[in-house]
Amino acid sequence: MNQPVAHDVARPRWQAPTPREHRNYPYNCWWVAASSAELGRELLGRWLLDTPVLLYRRESGEAVAIENRCPHRAAPLSLGCLKGDNVQCGYHGFTFAPDGACVNVPSTGAGLPAARIRAFPVIEQAPFVWIYLGDPDCIDQVPPPHDLEWARDDSFRYVHGMMPIKANYMLLKENVLDLTHFGYVHAKSFGISDWVDPPRSTTQGDTTSYHQSFDRSPLPPVFAAPLGLAPGTAYNRENYGSFVSPALQIAAVDFVEPDSGTITGRFRVSHATTPIDASRMLYFYVIGRDHGTSPEEMDGLLKGSETGFAEDEAMIEAVQDMVLCDPRGAGAPEISVKADAPGIQARRIVERWMARESG
Amino acid sequence: MNQPVAHDVARPRWQAPTPREHRNYPYNCWWVAASSAELGRELLGRWLLDTPVLLYRRESGEAVAIENRCPHRAAPLSLGCLKGDNVQCGYHGFTFAPDGACVNVPSTGAGLPAARIRAFPVIEQAPFVWIYLGDPDCIDQVPPPHDLEWARDDSFRYVHGMMPIKANYMLLKENVLDLTHFGYVHAKSFGISDWVDPPRSTTQGDTTSYHQSFDRSPLPPVFAAPLGLAPGTAYNRENYGSFVSPALQIAAVDFVEPDSGTITGRFRVSHATTPIDASRMLYFYVIGRDHGTSPEEMDGLLKGSETGFAEDEAMIEAVQDMVLCDPRGAGAPEISVKADAPGIQARRIVERWMARESG
Amino acid sequence: MNQPVAHDVARPRWQAPTPREHRNYPYNCWWVAASSAELGRELLGRWLLDTPVLLYRRESGEAVAIENRCPHRAAPLSLGCLKGDNVQCGYHGFTFAPDGACVNVPSTGAGLPAARIRAFPVIEQAPFVWIYLGDPDCIDQVPPPHDLEWARDDSFRYVHGMMPIKANYMLLKENVLDLTHFGYVHAKSFGISDWVDPPRSTTQGDTTSYHQSFDRSPLPPVFAAPLGLAPGTAYNRENYGSFVSPALQIAAVDFVEPDSGTITGRFRVSHATTPIDASRMLYFYVIGRDHGTSPEEMDGLLKGSETGFAEDEAMIEAVQDMVLCDPRGAGAPEISVKADAPGIQARRIVERWMARESG
């Protein structure tokens, strides 16, 4: 795990790249920048929260995130190349160290302190590389990245992936906070048709959670097979999840043998969303379980999840299009029901995160 | 023919989705939503006058038009499915009746009066399905859809089609109101080269019309063949047409035997245009005649018309591009001549339609 | 060489199509409209400085530039056709002479003085056709197009080409004014790795120039082969260039035998850039030399230059994207070093050109 990069003391007061009225995401928050598997000795350029970010690993393997914009003539540094741990711009050769210092300008033969770029604190907790894009002065007041403890538990195996989605990140958050969509969006893929009633939901501080128990409910094939049970077996399921930060939603299913009350299987999903800008996001997902963990079964889990998440993507992008095309904009109606309670709590929590930034 | 759908009495005051300064189309007008052939038991989603519209037929065959936007979380209802005469949203299963009522929310097991969506009055007069998107309180003051009487005349056969065009709808209206473009846009396709002089034009109320007589003029091949005459035969043609509403332009040619004065053939075209938004339209055309009506000849008529209308489309889209790219905008010059009189009258008529909306 | 077209005396006061705050290019300047080879008896429509321009040659061969917009109904005249030296609009047949006069409206059978369009002065100096899009009253105060004298010298051969680039034209200017990019952008193509130090630069009036001498420096293969020398031969090179107007940058390399001081080869490049609008340009280049001028060698010169210029294009478009995507806009940092002196002088010269327009 990397330590956050040290910051230069003499720097101008931090300013958010995008004014608050044009976004619904806080900067003073840890966000997922990439999956661990994405980073290596190739330069990876990404826009995250309207910020050009360059990601790579040092020779030691440590993850680095710096501004992906040469301050000389605005070339994306991702078009350049690595020189050891440093990045050389592909336009005129300005070279930057992982801490953002400009260590060489070829036409002068020297470094250039004024050309320092931002280096962003990163924390790697596989399978995620987290980034902090906010006010450096506030980093200590910000909750650290949520640790996916189960992912380090040897009895678990997981698969993961990333998809860019052309929609505001909260549309994905609201999707995973209202699982009544399973019977419609995923009717043909996941085949989980019994998530109909709104769950119990609770909010504690800045975490909103839902919990729903299915008692002696027929197991859908997608759940039965990894447990080694026949589809339709009457079984108990405890379904619960939490919005733990604007960056991350976690979800769980515990499978419980109805007679003994024994947990016979644990299933976990983490949904990390990082805004590219107000109408696009990167969606990083991790899906794991402690049963049905053979390579073939895990491969099936990944393929099935990709199919299902593509269904979510299509729906969410259609909603974003509707919002963008409708001239009524925010004036168009929005009706909520009890199943939306967790999603509405999540919006309020995001507002509180953002309100703290100006305080 | 369907009757307009009944409206809820207690509803908020109607407001146009787009402010007047951003459009040149009235809402209080019947527009063509689709051709009869397009509608069936599949969901058809369309933007018409900046409004998301969902079209389908009831089990009885009656056409339905409701808002294509779930008021829950803005999903396009066209991604859902039909349940009998109702539409079930593909996101969380909210279900709507043809009158817009929300008759079921699965997570509550009940309907939700507050989630009512708009239902739009529709009138089907084959081959067109007309829609009223305007102020419900004004529907009785609005002229009904123009009836294409000839299309119900057994001696006629017609073909029809629809093309989306990336241009303001009035560019098509002005195109069909100034037929001097035939000698240039359609020089190689229709081959009608004698429409050179501006026609007589008259305006009565909100209808502007043109009329032009061709006396003993050589028949172009496209007209001669269906009449069973040799190309170039000296023949009389009475060409006339009217802008009957912002939604519809009708045109006619009567072929007259020069010696006897007998009408030996009647040719009819209807051009319906419906704005998608200020720079895009749907163009619905119907072309019929009472001679040369064998299936092979009608197929030839359709193919030839498609070729010619594609020429109009290319020109009109080029004009729209010019208007959008030119930084002078409305300040760029526009010079009119006598042949533009019907088109200019049409603009004034549209302005009067729009002025009545605010009155 | 054509003479500028005479202008109508009674015309409204000239106005720039785009307000000054939305552009960084002067109108009162000669710009390259096309290469000589592009113009013929086909109609060529182009946007230049936010202006729709139609280019063609008269039957005599003389180049013509008029507004590419019919003042009747805004059709691009480039969709029409030539009738002798005149252009007939493809929509309703309005016909325009090379001086912009509307000489025929078919539906009236006469010309229409009010429908005159702008005719733009053009000067052809092969391989460039220059255009003046600015205030006609100021044309006499504007420096004439720079004459590429070497291109008319019989000992030279040249190749040339045009590429549309999605970037502001000054990004290309700054590219060719700071040749330290050769070692990075063109490391694999041109292989000229010794342009590292910033050149001497001088500004005289509105011309900024650089000069750099390479003494007994190993010749890169790209330079050695046409001179008939072995790659790596120690040789002298005098590299120099000038920003001669916002439209044109010229560059030269003289190859000098180190012992005798004799110039054994001369290499010339001209970079003409014409804004389409604020974020797109046409880039016209001419590359010539007086050695290695066999057809095979000149073909190799063209192909090699196309490869290298495509590298510039990719970098410049990436910079433009960065500028457009970054919400900080002009507020993002820009750090300059000594090698940027010519480019910064060029910006100031452009500002002076523009300041003169309002004076």
Image (cartoon, coloured by chain):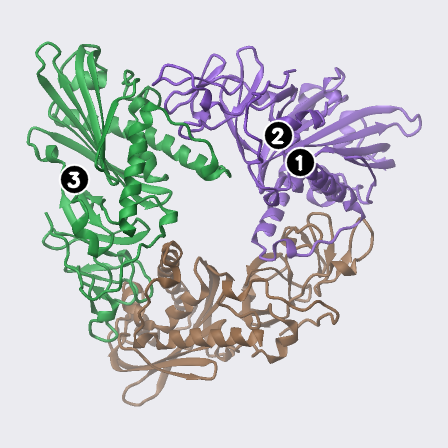
Chain colours: A brown, B green, C purple
Does residue B181 sit above or below B73 in this rendering?
above
Give the label, 3 or 2, closer to the camera: 2
Identity of the amino acid at label 1? Glu
For the residue labelled by badge 3, is the local secondary structure a helix, a strand or a loop?
loop
Q: Have a look at marks 1 and 2 and say if they share a chain.
A: yes
Q: Mark 2, chain letter? A: C
User: Looking at the picture, do discs 3 and 2 lie on one chain?
Assistant: no
Subunit that carries the residue with mark 3:
B
Residues indicated by labels 1 and 3 sit on the same polypeptide chain: no
Name the residue rendered at 64%, 34% in the picture: C273
> Badges 3 and 2: C-beta atoms under 8 Å apart?
no
Furthest residue toward left? B154
Q: Secondary structure at mark 2?
A: loop
Can you give x and y, in whole percent of width and height, for residue A356 in the image?
55, 77
Disc 1 from disc 2: Cα separation: 9 Å
Foreground: B76 or C130?
C130
- Please, what secondary structure does the residue beneath circle 1 have? helix
Mark 1 or mark 2, earlier in chain: 2
The residue shown at (82%, 45%) is C197
Badge 1 is on which residue? C357
- Residue topped by disc 3: B146
Residue at horizontal 38 percent and vertical 20 percent from the top: C93
